Image (cartoon, rainbow, N blue to C red):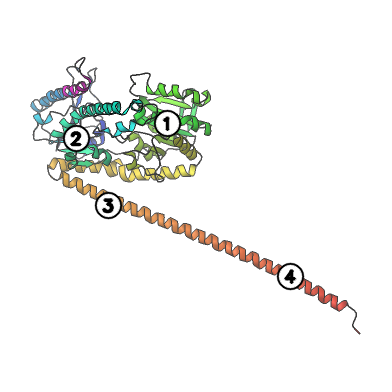
């Protein structure tokens, strides 16, 4: 089979899938975008031939904001179209399957070049108002809270228009595609109803062998701050530091948390997020808000590490005693699954799709998104309960191994989807069969958990009965001892009276 990956920055999420396809003997090629310097992204999978295209220009200066993004997707699609024509006409390549990411633009016109190819898209998030509405109630950050009903309704109508334009590239892609792969059920439910019938839910996977606990990990921060596994380290990892990723809730929890835990340090990983139009970036804006609430010595225990290479992010998670994950309802964060796979004790926001992977009290702790005080208290509680951290972390790792392991679970599902896509029939049936299989596995898991809980309850009941019987035995022993002592006293009294009778003079 001949497979073509199309993505501006290959291999992106397709690295392991491409490697598996090469190992199976398929012919695999990739189409990607050159860097601004004209270099080709490194596709570090031996056996994959890469062809790169350059962009002829950027978006039109002064273009309306909603249209500029769509125009950029079209420019990328046109450049990829020219590269695809060269691949067809000059290299004689005709793919059976083209795999791309929905909405990027580069695969918009591949069907014009290869109308018989099957186009499979990887979908991340179809934009709706769910995450935007979540911001309406964010204390101190949402402009909507200061508006009257009429102005709020107008602002929300404007938001709906913006979301429709953001979805325009996705809609264009979906009309051309033959199949769609989505990481979670919640993300799948965001896509338009007609697409849900052709949609397959499968995550791209976590390498649970490489991402594992490591109690030997060490790190040194600027200022010669030495860290080791076992220290009171609280981690927070996000692609960008902004309200959608919960930065404000974490920072608002810090005064209470650091006052309660004088040895704790907080490691915050992430790039600077989008800058608000009315002031400094979110990080500085929140620091300015909270600086008066914390002594400088506590601020010295808060470390903003910026964006880090993946290996360093893994080290942060391996050092972590408690990992905090906070987000509006958005695409599932890979860092959350990696933290769970490493065995972190996780405290997370009770939002979708986090609820799909984190069960409160079993694989972590879930709290209301806006509960900064509750976050501080829960993290402080876990920092002083190592046995509970160990239990939550072990169960989180087991869950990820069972549901999201790259080689044992996710890669086989992706290959199933790809084969069904290539066959041209049965994608819907195969997806439904996989869903049934997953539902059956989840039912078996739930039944096993219920059996384990029942066994635990029976053990606890037996333990209480044993303790009650032991207490009864001890009470009986105590009563027996009292009775023996009483009998001894009676015997002593009788013997004393008998002695007194013998010593008494005989009666006349």
Assess disc 4: are there few (<14), some (14-19) or many (≥20) residues with their C-alpha within 10 Å of its C-alpha: few
Asked if residue 122 lies in the magenta stretch, the reply is no
Whether pointer 2 and pointer 1 mark residues with C-beta atoms closer than 8 Å, the reply is no
> Count of labels shown?
4
Residue 272: percent from the left, percent from the top? Answer: 36, 23
Assess disc 3: are there few (<14), some (14-19) or many (≥20) residues with their C-alpha within 10 Å of its C-alpha: few
Q: CA distance from mark 3 to mark 4?
A: 70 Å
Of callouts 3 and 2, the N-terminal one: 2
Of callouts 2 and 1, the N-terminal one: 2
Secondary structure of residue under mark 3: helix
Q: CA distance from mark 4 to mark 1?
A: 71 Å
Circle 2 sits on which residue? 121
Circle 3 sits on which residue? 440
Assess disc 1: are there few (<14), some (14-19) or many (≥20) residues with their C-alpha within 10 Å of its C-alpha: many
Q: What residue is shown at x 52% (from left), y 34% (from top)?
A: 260
Q: Quadrant of the C terminus?
A: bottom right
Task: Tell which tag, 4 or 2, sits nearer the viewer.
Answer: 4
Residue 342: percent from the left, percent from the top? Answer: 39, 39
Along the horizontal axis of the image, is 317 left or right of 83?
right
Q: CA distance from mark 3 to mark 2?
A: 27 Å
Q: CA distance from mark 4 to mark 2?
A: 92 Å
Of callouts 1 and 3, the N-terminal one: 1
């Amino acid at each position: 089979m001949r497979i073509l990956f199309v993505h501006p920055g290959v291999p992106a999420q397709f690295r392991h899938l491409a490697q598996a396809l090469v190992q199976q003997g398929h012919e695999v090629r990739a189409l990607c975008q050159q860097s601004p310097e004209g270099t080709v992204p490194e596709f570090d999978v031996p056996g994959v031939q890469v062809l790169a295209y350059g962009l002829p220009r950027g978006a039109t200066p002064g273009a309306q904001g909603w249209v500029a993004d769509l125009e950029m997707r079209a420019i990328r699609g046109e450049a990829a179209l020219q590269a695809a024509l060269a691949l067809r006409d000059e290299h004689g390549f005709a793919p059976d399957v083209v795999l791309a990411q929905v909405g990027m633009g580069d695969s918009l016109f591949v069907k014009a070049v290869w109308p018989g190819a099957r186009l499979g898209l990887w979908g991340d998030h179809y934009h709706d108002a769910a995450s935007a509405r979540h911001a309406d109630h964010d204390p101190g950050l949402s402009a909507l809270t200061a508006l009257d009903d009429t102005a709020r309704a107008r602002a929300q109508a404007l938001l709906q228009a913006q979301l429709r334009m953001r979805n325009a590239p996705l809609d264009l892609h979906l009309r051309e595609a033959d199949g769609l792969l989505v990481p979670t059920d919640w993300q799948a439910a965001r896509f338009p109803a007609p697409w849900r019938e052709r949609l397959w839910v499968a995550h791209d996977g976590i390498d649970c062998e490489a991402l594992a606990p490591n109690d030997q990990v060490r790190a040194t921060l600027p200022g010669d701050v030495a860290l080791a596994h076992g220290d009171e380290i609280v981690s927070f990892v996000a692609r960008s530091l902004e309200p959608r990723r919960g930065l404000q809730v974490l920072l608002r929890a810090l005064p209470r948390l650091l006052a309660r835990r004088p040895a704790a340090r907080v490691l915050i990983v992430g790039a600077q997020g989008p800058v608000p139009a009315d002031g400094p970036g979110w990080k500085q804006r929140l620091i300015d808000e909270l600086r008066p609430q914390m002594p400088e010595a506590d601020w010295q225990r808060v470390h903003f590490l910026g964006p880090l290479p993946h290996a360093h992010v893994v080290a942060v998670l391996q050092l972590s005693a408690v990992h905090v994950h906070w987000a509006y309802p958005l695409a599932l964060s890979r860092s959350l699954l990696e933290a769970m796979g490493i065995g972190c004790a996780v405290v997370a926001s009770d939002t979708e799709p986090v609820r799909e992977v984190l069960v409160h009290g079993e694989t972590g702790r879930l709290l209301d998104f806006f509960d900064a005080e509750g976050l501080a208290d829960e993290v402080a509680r876990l920092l002083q309960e190592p046995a509970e951290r160990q239990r939550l972390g072990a169960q989180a790792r087991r869950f990820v191994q069972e549901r999201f392991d790259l080689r044992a679970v996710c890669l086989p599902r992706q290959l199933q989807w790809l084969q069904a896509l290539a066959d041209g029939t049965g994608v819907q049936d195969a997806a439904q069969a996989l869903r049934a299989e997953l539902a059956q596995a989840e039912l078996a898991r739930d039944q096993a958990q219920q059996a384990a809980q029942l066994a635990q309850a029976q053990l606890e009941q037996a333990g209480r009965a044993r303790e009650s019987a032991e207490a009864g035995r001890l009470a009986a022993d105590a009563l027996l001892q009292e009775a023996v002592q009483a009998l001894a006293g009676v015997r002593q009294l009788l013997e004393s009276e008998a002695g007194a009778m013998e010593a008494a003079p005989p009666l006349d």
